[in-house]
């Protein structure tokens, strides 16, 4: 007979609860990336975010078609407003399926439905984990792990997919580029700025501002020969694939970049 805790939970149940609570934490953090992008996207569509604009009109129209949004004779901003509102609604949806699941291969969609792991809403599945892992709720480790799978799909094919689609529209769909990587991209005679993090919303503006003649002249007036931008971690990939900005390193190299003494600011 299996040993049980005073609450009646087996070791399998306890392990499953702990594991999927970590899944909930990761999905919440990762999917919130998509929420932030959707909020900015909607603000851009409404003319409330100066400096940002829709750069990939073709991707805008494609996403509208994929999501069942009318195009007709409507302006880009009108279409984008509907896309932004629909994207934000995916987080709080309570029934049905995430609209972005349609991007997955048909066989995969069918499998998710057969197994009952097609997410209803991004936030919905995260809350479900926190509920079912509480004492006195779900004791079946198989059911608990199944909910972990559903939540993970809601992150990857929900929040992350929304972020990908909307970032492409706002900042341009990436194309293959040649780039440089590692700490050797830092330059002794320039102001070295490292852009760090997971979301490209601010980094896109930093790239644009750093290329302005006035900023370059300001750097030269302080004794530098110019401004050198480099990326770190996930944001590095975003600005590499859209602007060719070199990658200084990954998450494990963030402190190493600072201790070189060559970095003037890490943003």
Image (cartoon, rainbow, N blue to C red):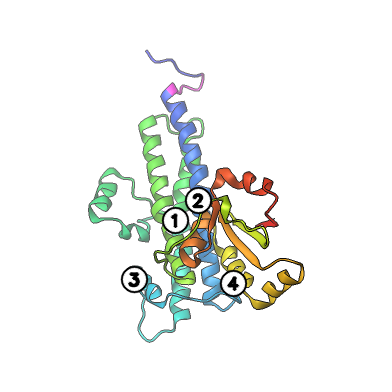
* Sequence order check, earlier mark of 4 and 1: 1
- How far apart marks 1 and 2 lie (CA) works out to 7 Å
C-beta proximity under 8 Å, tags 3 and 2? no
Question: Which one is closest to the eye, mark 4 or mark 1?
Answer: 4
Q: Do labels 4 and 1 touch, CB within 8 Å? A: no
Q: Is residue 254 left or right of residue 27?
A: right
The span picked out in magenta is 6-11
Q: Which residue is mark 4?
A: 208
Q: Circles 1 and 2: CB distance less than 8 Å? A: yes
Tell me if residue 10 is in the magenta stretch: yes
| Mark 3 or mark 1, earlier in chain | 3
The answer to whether any part of residue 10 appears in the image is no
Question: Is 26 left or right of 110, judged from the image as shown?
Answer: right
The residue depicted at 54 percent of the width and 58 percent of the height is 199
Q: Earlier in the sequence, mark 1 or mark 2?
A: 2
Q: Nearer the viewer, residue 128 or 218?
A: 218
Q: Which mark is residue 68?
A: 3
Of the image marks 4 and 3, the number of the one nearer the N terminus: 3
Badge 1 crowding class, 10 Å Cα cut-off, few under 14, some 14 to 19, many 20 or more, is many
Estimate the x, y position of residue 84 in percent, counting from the top left. Answer: 47, 69
Examine the rendered structure and indicate whether residue 132 appears above or below residue 195.
above
Please tell me which residue lies in front, 56 or 38: 56
Question: Do callouts 4 and 3 mark residues in contact (Cβ within 8 Å)?
Answer: no
Task: Return the mark for residue 160.
Answer: 1
In the rendered structure, find residue 30 and report the number of the disc placed on it.
2
Q: In this picture, is 13 found above or below 152?
A: above
Neighbour tally class for label 2: few under 14, some 14-19, many 20 plus, Cα within 10 Å: some
Label 3 with label 1: CB-CB less than 8 Å: no
Magenta stretch mostly in which secondary structure? loop
């Amino acid at each position: 007979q299996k040993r049980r805790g005073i609450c009646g939970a087996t070791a399998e149940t306890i392990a499953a609860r702990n594991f999927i609570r970590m899944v909930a934490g990761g999905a919440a953090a990762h999917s919130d990336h998509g929420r932030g992008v959707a909020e900015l996207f909607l603000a851009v569509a409404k003319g409330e975010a100066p400096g940002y604009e829709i750069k990939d009109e073709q991707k805008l129209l494609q996403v509208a078609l994929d999501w069942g949004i009318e195009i007709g004779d409507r302006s880009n901003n009108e279409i984008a407003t509907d896309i932004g509102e629909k994207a934000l609604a995916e987080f709080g949806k309570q029934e049905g399926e995430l609209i972005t699941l349609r991007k997955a291969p048909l066989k995969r969609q069918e499998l998710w439905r057969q197994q009952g792991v097609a997410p209803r809403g991004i936030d919905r599945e995260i809350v479900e984990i926190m509920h079912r892992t509480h004492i006195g709720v779900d004791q079946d480790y198989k059911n608990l792990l199944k909910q972990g799978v559903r939540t993970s799909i809601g992150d990857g094919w929900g929040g992350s997919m929304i972020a990908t689609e909307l970032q492409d529209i706002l900042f341009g769909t990436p194309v293959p580029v040649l780039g440089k990587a590692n700490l050797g991209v830092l330059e002794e005679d320039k102001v070295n700025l490292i852009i760090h993090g997971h979301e490209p919303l601010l980094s896109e503006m930093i790239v644009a501002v750093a290329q302005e003649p006035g900023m370059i002249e300001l750097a030269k007036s302080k004794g530098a020969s110019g401004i050198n931008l480099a990326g770190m971690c996930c944001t590095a990939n975003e600005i590499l694939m859209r602007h060719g900005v070199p990658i200084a390193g990954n998450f494990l190299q963030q402190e190493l970049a600072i201790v070189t003494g060559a970095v003037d600011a890490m943003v």
